[in-house]
Image (tube, rainbow, N blue to C red):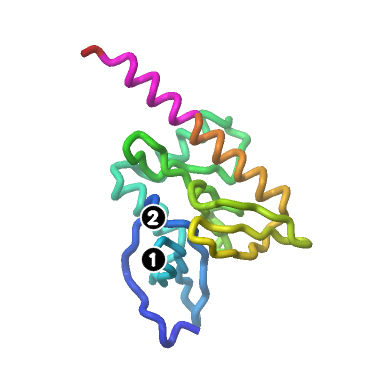
Amino acid sequence: MLENVNVVDYYHLSFNSYLIEPVKHEDKLFSRVYDKTGEVIVGRKPIYIVRKSCQVMGNNYKAARAVSKRFFGKEKHKLPIIISHDYGIPCVFFPLLSPASPSNVWIGLHAVTNIRRSKDCTEITLKDGKELLLNVNYSSFCSQYVSASMLQKYATNERLIFQNEMPF
């Protein structure tokens, strides 16, 4: 499956990234990342890439989860997180399953242009027009999408409040 594919060791998520999913090859878990350039295979697990992306952007995964927990409450699971802020806009990714699950897929909120029910799955369209069938219940996907949207709106409003309170 990955024999003729170039596998990179490093990748960090940004607004250019759309979706990251696990890909198993032999005994190792890799990541397939869909982004504005197409697809890339990374020789790391999705959660590793998410954690490192937070770190590269001056944040850390634990702090990103803490922000989400503070907003949603401690009982919320499958938390969306803010990877970074680009020109004041939060770059939010949300998980479809538990982030600890080796089957988890992370999706950039900014990357989804359409969501459709497809039997027991969900079909999404990404910014580049690529359509993907995800093995997740439509209602569950929509719930995660709405949570990510709420976090993005909250973070944007908080940043505006902070900016307006700064003395000049």
The residue shown at (49%, 36%) is 152
Please, what is the three-letter code of the amino acid marked with disc 2? Answer: Asn
Element assignment for label 1:
loop
**Contact? badges 2 and 1 (CB < 8 Å):** yes
The residue at the far front in this view is: 129
Identify the mark nearer the N-term, 2 or 1.
2
Q: Residue at x 46, y 33 (%)?
A: 67
Q: Which of the image's four quarters has the C terminus? A: top left
| Callout 2 secondary element | loop
Q: Can you say whether 125 is above or below 64 in the image?
A: below
Residue tagged 2: 16
Q: Specify the farthest residue to the right.
A: 119
Image coords of residue 29 (percent x, y): 48, 71
Q: Which region of the structure is painted magenta?
A: 154-166
At x 39% / y 50%, what residue is drawn? 15
> What number is the disc on residue 92?
none
- Label placed on residue 37: 1
Q: Is residue 67 above or below residue 130?
A: above
Q: In the image as oriented, which residue stretches furthest toward the bottom? A: 3
Relative to 104, 34 lies left or right = left
Q: Residues within 10 Å of mark 1 (few under 14, many from 20)?
A: few
* Main secondary structure along the magenta-highlighted residues: helix
Q: How far apart are the two marked residues, 2 and 1, measured between alpha carbons?
A: 8 Å
Residue 164 covered by magenta stretch: yes
Quarter of the rendering containing residue 59: top left
**Which x, y percent locates residue 31?**
46, 68
Is residue 92 found left or right of 164 in the rendered image?
right
Crowding around mark 2 (Cα neighbors within 10 Å: few <14, some 14 to 19, many 20+) is some
